[in-house]
Each structure stands twice: as C-alpha cells, then as structure tokens.
Amino acid sequence: MSTKRSYADGCAAAHALDLVGERWALLVVRELLLGPKRFSGLRRGLPGAAPNVIAQRLRDLEAAGVVRRRTLPPPVASQVYELTAWGLELEPVVRALGRWGSRSPGMDHDAPLSVDALVLAMRTLFAPGRAAGLDATYALRVDDDAFTATVGGGEFRIVRGTGPADVAVTAAGTVLNEVIWGDQDLGAAVDDGLVRLDPDTEAARRFFDLFPLPEPAAPAGAGR
C-alpha cells in the first residue's frame, strides 16, 4: 500500500481494513461490482472524490490484488478497471454494510446515489415476500445506463445490459431513488413524465414496491 499505514493487528478484519479501509476505496469497489469501468465512469459514479484520489485508490487496490487493469480489444482499445475474482467476493460485504447503514436513524435517504449504488441497493433490499406471484423481466434505462432485472420464484436478479423484457422502465436515477425510497408518488411521477412504463401494467408498478427499507435502529438512549 502506498500510504504504508497499517493497524499492525493480527485480526483478519484489521488486515481487510488495511486493504480497503482508506477513504473512497470501498466505494471504488462498489462502482466496479457490476462490471468493468473506464476511469471516466468511475469519476461519474464518485463525483465527490478528486480524480487524483480515485487514481491513488485504484493503484492501492491493484497492488492489493483487488482490482486489475485491462485493455479492451480494438477498435475500442481503451483501458478499463475491473475487480479480480477475489475482489468480487467483497459484494456480500458491501451489501451487508449497506443494509446495516440503511437502518441508521441518521441515514439521509434523499441524498444522491450513483446508478450502480442504486442497483446494488435493489439487490440488497429486495423483499421476496413482496414479489409473491410476480414473474416478470424488466428493462431498466437509468440515466445513460441499461440493466435487465428478472423477478420470479421469490428471487431478484439484475445485470448490466439490455435483453428481452416484459416491461421497460425509464427514469433518471434521482427519480427512481425518490420513488422507491423517498416521498415521490409513482402515479404522479408517471403522469408528469418523470417515469415511463412501457406498458403501464400492474407488474410494472409492483416493481417499485419490492425494495423496502428495513426498520431503523433504535436511537441512542431509547428505552432508558
């Protein structure tokens, strides 16, 4: 690691923090969990991080064996960053941390989310009980990204890319965040053209109800 800082602690959790505990490091991992990205894509997903900080975190993560660089074949021939197989094992860690954080009484659910963070939140918060009887495939067009989501058998899968779908859902990431976890009413968003459903069916509208927030943790001092 370029910072040379370490907890110097024999606990494996402490060593893990040596590897991914620097500011922005785990969010770089988050942005790569759904697939490779160019440096420009990472900058879009992490607008609060300076470019030099992102570059340093990538170097640190590459040195740790979490991230690797790859050059795409011609005619693209551009460089992308992707997680190694070991790096991909961090997904359940990121998702568990996200679920834990979403229970914080101080969590600001109206704060902006990157598109990848929004999709990972869907994976994290999917409630199988709310999907009873639902069997559908959704084409999600969020900002400049496209995803294919499948709901069936009490399971939820979502991957980057387009494919055959029963319903197309188109909206800005900020709008989806507000409709799913905020105070924006879905019907009003559809009427105002902020969300497009093609076709506008019950299955289309049920999609937005599949990702409830968990009960918030009791605030400090509660019950005393």
Image (cartoon, grey):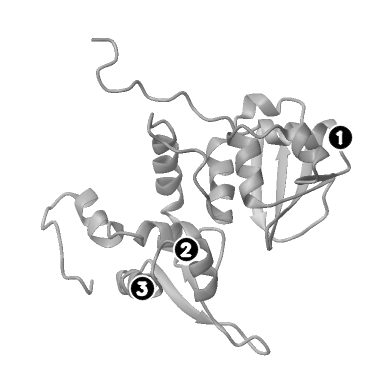
Tell me what residue is drawn at x 63 percent, y 36 percent: 180
Residue count near mark 3 (Cα–Cα under 10 Å), binned few <14, some 14–19, many ≥20: some
Q: Is residue 201 visible?
A: yes
| Residue for badge 2 | 47
68 sits left or right of 9 in the view: right
Of helix, strand and loop, which one carries label 3? helix
Tell me what residue is drawn at x 83 percent, y 54 percent: 164
In the image, 128 versus 210, the foreground residue is: 210
| Residue for badge 1 | 201
200 sits left or right of 35 in the view: right
Residue count near mark 1 (Cα–Cα under 10 Å), binned few <14, some 14–19, many ≥20: few
- Kindly report which numbered mark, 2 or 1, lies closer to the viewer in this rendering: 2
122 sits left or right of 214 in the view: right
Q: Position of residue 1 (x, y in %)?
A: 23, 71
Q: Position of residue 121 (x, y in %)?
A: 54, 43
Q: Position of residue 179 (x, y in %)?
A: 66, 37
Decide which of tag 3 and tag 1 comes sooner along the chain: 3
State the residue lying farthest toward the right.
Answer: 199
Cα separation between marks 3 and 1 = 46 Å
